[in-house]
Amino acid sequence: MPAASTAFPPKRRKVDRAVEEMISKTSRHTMGGGNVKHDERTSTIEGIGFSRLDKGMKVLGAVNQIFSDDLVTVSLPNGLVGYVMRRDKSEPPLEVSLKVGTMMAFAVLSVSRTEKRVELSVSPTHVNRGLTLDQISAGQVVRVKVEGSEDHGWSCGLGMAGVKCFFPRKLYTGSSKVTVGMSLDAVVVKSSREARMVSVTDDLGSQIGITVQPHHVDPGCSQFNLKGVRPGMMVERVEPKIGVWFRVPGKGAAGTVGNKRKSGTPAPDEIVFVHVSDLGLTDSSDTTVRKNFPTGKEAVVRILGHHKMDDWLKGSLKKEIIEAKVLDYGDIQVGERYRGVPIVKQGDYGVVVKLGEGVNAMVSNIHLKGKNQNKVGTKMDVKALTVDADGRRCMATARRELVKEDMFASYQEMDVNDVSTGFITKVDAKGIVVTFVNNTHGTVPATALAEEQGVEDPKVNYKVGEIVKARFTGMNVKGGGGRMGLSLDLKKKSKPAEKAPSGAYEVGDLIVEKELTIVSIEGGEIAMEGKGGSCKCGFEAFKDKYSNPSEPSAEVKKEIKVGKKVKAQGLVVSKDKKYPHTPIVTFRKQIVLERAEVPRALKSLTAGDIVTGWVANKVAAHGAFVRFMNHHTALVPALKGGGELQLYDTIRVKISKIDAKGGKILCTIPKTSSMEKMFSKAVGSAVGKVEVVDLKKERAYVKMLDGRFPGKCRIRVHMSMFEGDKGKGIVGGDGEFIPPSHPFSGLKVGSVIRNATIASADTVEDLTYIDLTNLDSVPPMDVEKFSVGVCVSGVVEEALKGKGCHIRCSPGVKVWGSRTEMVSAEEGDRVKVVVTKNNEGKINVSERKFEALKGSVGGTVELGDRK
């Protein structure tokens, strides 16, 4: 398929039945992609043509291109192209089942004679149609669909009523994850007619496939460069009314005639097909084509794409195509100027310009010049700002200053004090954000605007879309982050930052025992050298507790000596403020062991977190100052126990208040009694942060980060008891697809859930199951507690069009909201409702009454006489 084609599969050009019959007798590319030499004494295989395709047929094809989660194009024999659509959004993306270049069987779903389009399916329901259990035997390849995950394997479907299929985990030979909903080809291991059961494996290695096309027998032989202009292409053959075949003998991937591949076989010929409409002739009659393209004539051809099934390239001889800068989104160069491109569409958002055949760019309103110059057909000069080749999207600007001037394109290519033109994309009280090419952007702080430009309020002086010139002042790495610093004062010069040596120690790095050698001990500072360069620490950084904190050196000097290696693990906790490339190390055992609980940045903290640090200083009037990584410091007030702490002790503290703007943190000491209460099984107890260790569609299993429960327990979070940001959808640990509408769609293994509380706990034999929630109000867990008037929240588990929806309020409680009682009923929505009826566990709820009566989750409302 041509790389420059639109996102929807291209229409087939009209080919009549007579031509198709001629192709079946003369074309090298016959059904199945094989090179069949015909002999009049034998029966011939007719090549497949568009007019012969019909609904229900099975065809062999090769996956050509994956455009999106929902659309894949397929190369079929004899140059035909089909497509597969994902119509059920609850199914996993098509790329889970289909990989570019894979050859497999497809079923024809529909054929549009008018639009010349062929829709295909990979579902076993369609591919296996007509297949019976009696016809299935060991060694046979069948299409299966994974329907569920079990302990020992996956249950699959064959699209055959009453027939079960199982795929044992021990027989899985692949490396990619098996996902619920995916379709794949599998080999039958065992078939039982009595049990109506089929066992399969994905090991296709022992199966025999028959083909004579070298690119299917040995996929490595097809190594053509699929882009660029090919001079010296020779006419091989003319297909009347269809096109011309070109070839460069023995010119393969290396680009030289007679080139041999690693296997020792000659490189394949490049075969290029050019349709009559792409020959660049005004008259495409058979006589004219043969006259202009006699056998052996050389021509310059521009490659447009690759037909994977038959392994030939598609090209064009049109002058405008050969000379075109852009034929595909991958050809667009970010920061490149494109002159005289026409506007092809206009809307409220801006305009769309044509950069090449089937390749467009959007120019938003803030990037347009005069309003009267933006009509369809008008030509303008633009510059590409961002390109997403896979998503087939490009953003451009038509503002003269931006098109004309060079702009920053990446952080790596800039030097301090370089100047570039950019445009403002954000204005607030903190300053302005200036954006350049490739989404490279930086901030001019409000303090710099006030000092250099006399601007008191950026929102008054600047607006989004305004063009400015900015000077690069360096990367701001405060707090462990990385932001591009800018200034509007172009004359001022900033001092370039000292570059860190390659491989230097960074904050958070763990240093193994005996890696560091002590090079000097001066005053209260110890200098060391290791694989990552120089680093240092103080005497107070060696122990978690000192018997005499006023003189820590007295205890440490006995254990260290210049020229000796440090016999302890170290952790880089910060960089020296005066010399920013000198790491500061600690050897405290508790800090090293609990390094994941030592904060690195303020943004990672929330009130209630229990974290690890060390007492860096004590002031009688204020309390104790506890140090974390990157010099972040918290205060334990004297009245909250700070006065009782010992200097240099490693301790755990509970965050009580955070002032992100001022960088101030207040904390307290968790007492033993409160810790026991925190980790008890009482409903409503806070457990702080938990980390997801396994994720399934119904439940997420977690581990505690702020302590542990006594005894054997399993901690989990049910989907009905969790609220968080939605994501794009992921595959759960059991292989089941979690769609974007699901409450867990924004989670993954390793995600941290904050402010979790205990919703319920149940002990079975010696194992305790603890259910957590991050909801503000713990939902009732028993059906009996859902009395009339109780206000609860829940997740829409199933929406039935025109009827209502099933809502899951807690793991064991599902309620019903009829269409007339619900405002919104989309699957995955969290809704707030009031119970209107509870008849022996059959619970009805109303969202409309909850809103009308101004209900509050966890509370009750009066519904009058309704029972």
Image (cartoon, rainbow, N blue to C red):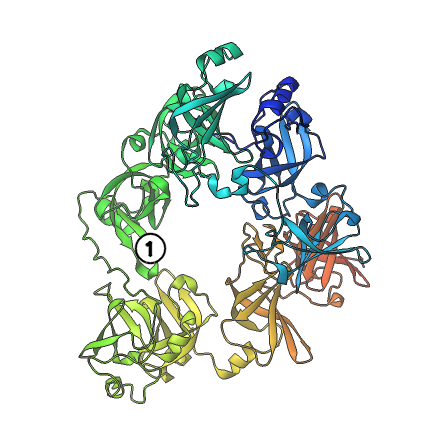
Vertical relation: 388 (above or below) 350: below
Q: Nearer the viewer, residue 88 or 539?
A: 88
Where is 419 relative to 847, above or below? above
Say which quadrant the C terminus sits in: bottom right
Residue occupying image coordinates x 65% and y 63%: 858
Q: Position of residue 723 (x, y in %)?
A: 58, 58
Q: Is residue 395 left or right of residue 687?
A: left
Question: Relative to 272, is 842 above or below?
Answer: below
> Image check: 454 left or right of 258?
left
Crowding around mark 1 (Cα neighbors within 10 Å: few <14, some 14 to 19, many 20+) is few
Q: In the rendering, at what x and y percent does residue 90 appear?
A: 64, 48
Q: Can you name the residue that lies furthest to the front here?
A: 41
Question: How far across and down, in percent of the image, does residue 709 sit?
Answer: 56, 78
**How many numbered circles are shown?**
1
User: Does residue 285 show up?
Assistant: no
The reply to whether residue 466 is visible in this rendering is yes
Percent coordinates x, y for residue 500 in the rendering: 24, 60
Looking at the rendered structure, the secondary structure element under dot 1 is loop
Q: Amino acid at mark 1?
A: Gly
Toward the viewer: 600 or 7? 7
Residue 836 vs residue 133, the one in the foreground: 133
The residue indicated by pointer 1 is 482
Residue 118: image quadrant is top right
